[in-house]
Amino acid sequence: MEGKAATSSRLLRNMMVRVLLLGVLIFLLRFAYVVTITGESCNRGDFCFFSLPPNLVSVIGSTSPVADDDDLIKSVQFYSSVFRDLISDGFLSPDSKSLCVEATPTGREVFSLREIGVKDSIGISKKALRPLVVKGEGHSIPFQDNTFDFIFSGGGRLGKSLKPLEFAEEITRTLKPQGIAVVHVAATDTYSFNSFLDLFNSCSLIKMRDLDAPFDSPHIREFVIQKYSGGGHHKKSSGGGGGKCWIPGYKTDLIRDAEPLIQEEPLKPWITLKRNIQNVKYIPSMVDIRFKSRYVYVDVGSRSYGSSIGSWFKKQYPKQNKTFDVFAIEADKAFHEEYKIKKKVQLLPYAAWVRNETLSFEINHDPGNEVEAKAMGRGMGRIQPVKKSSSSLAGEVNLIQGFDFADWLKKSVRERDFVVMKMDVEGTEFDLIPRLIKTGAICLIDELFLECHYNRWQRCCPGQRSQKYNKTYNQCLELFTSLRQSGVLVHQWW
């Protein structure tokens, strides 16, 4: 009997030891999850009985296989310093419901906020790491409207986004009226600075300062913006009617720095074109365009794909790695078939005009210019109202549909878009440009490459002027000058 009692006692002790060891194991696993994996501080009232470890790497992890303690500590110190300054300035408080948009994968910004006392803080990132970071992206924030008192976006992530407008609109949407958003970007010039502010047209700029960051771009600019109390759009439009554009100073600076207009009529314009291309100062070669909401190229009078879209715009225009929406406007049916296989080009098979109406479309060549006509393969098309159709120049005449180009432009692009246009319309520019100015649609064009048609000296026949056009070079020069005065960076094109 005594032997059986001893055996039972040993079994009971072994069972108790195993239960105790199991409990310790469960505790250690829980502790490892809360502290080592999630990066959560032990003041949440969760299953955690120890204070924050002094080694930050063990708390919030590292994005690299081998943790760099110095970089990690510097980044946390940087964010903590930024947030403390915002608290001192009254833009952030311990009671603020806060969001970090596209936070670092380990949530260092969120960790910094919580450690300085802003406990109701969360971050979103492509990869969730709860409880500091949940899944989400800047252009699609997974929270309801008017949710947060404070939103932060660091690391220049808005500038790196492929959808900057949606990114900005989502910040504005989820921010409470009169809430504060702080965005860190690398705004390198006045143009990009204003383009950035245009993304937040429901907010006002409260403060701006330059910072030295220990990571990413070392020099960043901090924007503190506040959402309007009503949440509406308060920015003044620059594309109204009446022919008046509000021309911001940063745009006039670009025009001032552009290549000068050629004041004297060139004797050989076909040579002048090649030389002038080397002098052209494109906007993307002067400023940063990454904060534009969309990028658009409109080729008015595009002819074949290789005439200018493929041979010039695709190859030579500096796009800063941006993808442009390309529109080709060409009335001549001879070129329409080619565009059916150009999937990234949208063809408008009509004539750009001042109103919607049927037009006479005439294909012709300069008299005495048979050699050039043969090389071109097809003459240049000219349009005019049917009732005024000219019979002075022999050629192929067809009826085509013209459309109100200014109205189409105002419906197709916005002020926050970056719009580049090439216009070669065989003299119709003297109808289209005044219409664009009158309607205010001209304000939507950032950069224009314009071929102005006048009675220029002919290449084929020395000493003879073109009989196709009755305008003079001085009239073309006046047109270019009026465009630059309207705030459009226009380049002379031949």
Image (spheres, rainbow, N blue to C red):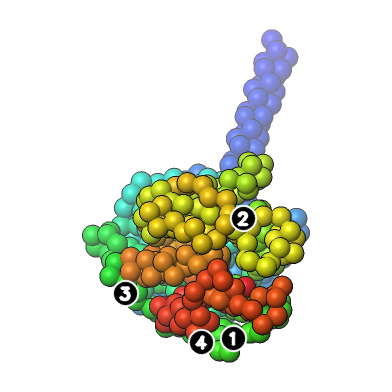
Q: Is mark 2 on a helix, strand or loop?
A: loop
Task: For label 1, count other residues whose C-alpha is less than 10 Å away and answer few (under 14), some (14-19) or many (20+).
Answer: some
> Residue at (33%, 49%) from the top-left corner?
145
- Counting residues from the start of the chain, the first of labels 4 and 3 encountered is 3
> What is the quadrant of residue 248 in the picture?
bottom left
Of all residues, the one furthest to the left in this rendering is 230
Give neighbour class at mark 4: few <14, some 14-19, many 20+ (Cα, 10 Å).
few
Q: Earlier in the sequence, mark 1 or mark 4?
A: 4
**Res 321 visible:** no
Residue at the spot of label 3? 244
Identify which amino acid the numbered label 1 is placed on: Glu
Whole-number angstrom distance, CA of label 1 to CA of label 4 = 22 Å
Provide the secondary structure element on which disc 3 rests: loop
Hey, what amino acid is under mark 2?
A: Arg
Q: Distance between the residues labelled 1 and 3?
A: 30 Å
Q: How far apart are marks 4 and 3 (CA)?
A: 20 Å
Describe residue 70's horizontal placement relative to residue 154 as left or right: right
User: Residue visible at 47% across and 81% down?
Assistant: 475
What's the mark number on residue 265?
Answer: 1
The N terminus lies in quadrant = top right
